[in-house]
């Protein structure tokens, strides 16, 4: 049973944004917002709406397709974003939004790290028989590791759409306590700890000297949000690209994954500052900028078992062509009782 209240996406006649409703509030909302204005109440429509509500709130895992197929909610700017998290799976919310200034489209996940069923998976790419990291698309990473979601993370040296090429992760990769790629002291990393205190943190890779207490780590580029404040890095870089990033909530209980589309009509990409501001609007206190550009991809598993990106990756100037990348971060939900 999903304990969160049913999330209803609706636009009031005043133009206000979405909000959350309980079952009883939902029925009242239907009556007073939709039907009073038309002068009558349709009993069939009320019954149908209640059945939909009952189905949505009685499943352990909702249909990913139903969560990701809706139209994006449009906001004036990245600082004005108020996320509406649609239930994607137990402990995972999905949000699809747009910002008019700048003109970008983005996709985000909110993951409950406090849930005992949540599993964070980090890999350095596919591994050859002799232990060499090979390039893999985010969809392949997500599918082959039986994950619900996956995102690209670590910068790397070879750019190609072909999988299986030897690559070098340009940053730390720790997977289930095993170091697969060394630190890059220039950059920062998202680290998950074994003792869960804190559950996760964003740290300089140069400060990672002891790894015994680290369960997983994914190197990125630079930290762009620290204690909910923009870092100096965001004031330097004004380049606009597709972006991938991650952040954690003030209490460390939630992980946020974000992909911003760019280089296409309808989404021009974001600067590091805009990425940081958007992650803060989503609920992050600290955030890191992952590898971006043509590498940016967020993949989700669908009800039929297929895995697809929710964003539109662009490799080599071709929309929809996914790049084969290096270190990725993924999420799974344990089924063990």
Image (tube, rainbow, N blue to C red):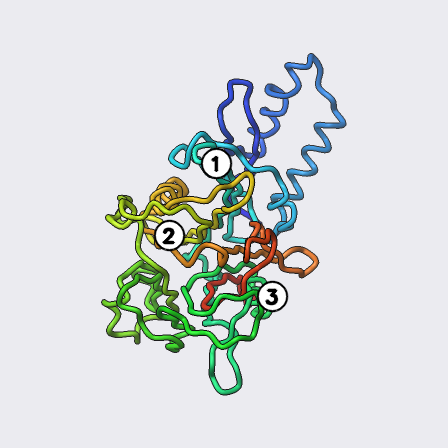
**Which dot, 1 or 2, sits closer to the camera?**
1
Q: Earlier in the sequence, mark 3 or mark 2?
A: 3
Disc 2 marks which residue?
247
Label 1 vs label 2: CA separation?
A: 22 Å
Mark 2, secondary structure of its residue: strand
Relative image position of residue 306 (x, y in whole percent) = 67, 60
Q: Quadrant of residue 136?
A: bottom right
Report whether 34 appears left or right of 194.
right
Relative image position of residue 64 (x, y in whole percent) = 62, 51
Mark 1, secondary structure of its residue: loop
Residue projecting furthest to the front: 317
Disc 3 marks which residue?
143
Relative image position of residue 114 (x, y in whole percent) = 41, 57
Q: Earlier in the sequence, mark 1 or mark 2?
A: 1
Label 1 vs label 3: CA separation?
A: 31 Å
Q: Residue at x 49, y 66 (%)?
A: 159
Quadrant location, the C terminus: bottom right
Residue 170: which disc?
Answer: none
Residue projecting furthest to the right: 44
When the figure is inspected, residue 123 is found, relative to residue 29, above or below; the finding is below
Relative image position of residue 96 (x, y in whole percent) = 53, 42
Disc 1 marks which residue?
103
């Amino acid at each position: 049973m999903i304990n969160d209240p049913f999330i209803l996406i609706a636009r009031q006649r005043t133009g206000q944004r979405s909000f959350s409703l309980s079952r009883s509030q939902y029925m009242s909302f239907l009556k007073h917002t939709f039907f009073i204005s038309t002068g009558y109440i349709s009993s069939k429509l009320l019954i149908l709406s209640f059945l939909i509500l009952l189905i949505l709130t009685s499943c352990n895992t909702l249909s990913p397709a139903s969560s990701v197929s809706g139209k994006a909610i449009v906001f004036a700017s990245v600082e004005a974003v108020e996320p509406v998290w649609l239930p994607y799976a137990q402990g995972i919310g999905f949000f699809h939004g747009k910002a008019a200034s700048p003109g970008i489209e983005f996709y985000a996940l909110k993951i409950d790290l406090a849930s005992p069923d949540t599993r964070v998976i980090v890999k350095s790419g596919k591994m050859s028989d002799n232990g060499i990291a090979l390039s893999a698309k985010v969809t392949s990473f997500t599918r082959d590791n039986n994950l619900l979601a996956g995102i690209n993370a670590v910068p790397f040296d070879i750019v190609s759409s072909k999988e299986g090429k030897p690559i070098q992760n340009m940053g730390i990769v720790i997977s289930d306590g095993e170091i697969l790629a060394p630190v890059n002291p220039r950059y920062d990393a998202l680290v998950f700890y074994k003792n869960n205190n804190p559950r996760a943190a964003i740290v300089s890779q140069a400060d990672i000297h002891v790894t015994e207490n680290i369960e997983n780590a994914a190197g990125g580029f630079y930290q762009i949000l620290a204690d909910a404040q923009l870092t100096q890095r965001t004031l330097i870089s004004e380049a606009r690209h597709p972006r991938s990033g991650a952040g954690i909530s003030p209490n460390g209980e939630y992980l946020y994954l974000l992909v911003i589309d760019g280089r296409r009509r309808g989404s021009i990409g974001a600067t590091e500052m805009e990425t940081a501001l958007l992650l803060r609007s989503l609920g992050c206190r600290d955030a890191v900028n992952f590898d971006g550009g043509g590498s940016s991809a967020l993949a989700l598993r669908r009800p039929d078992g297929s895995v697809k990106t929710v964003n539109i990756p662009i490799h080599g100037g071709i929309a929809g062509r996914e790049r084969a990348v290096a270190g990725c971060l993924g999420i799974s939900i344990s089924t063990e009782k």
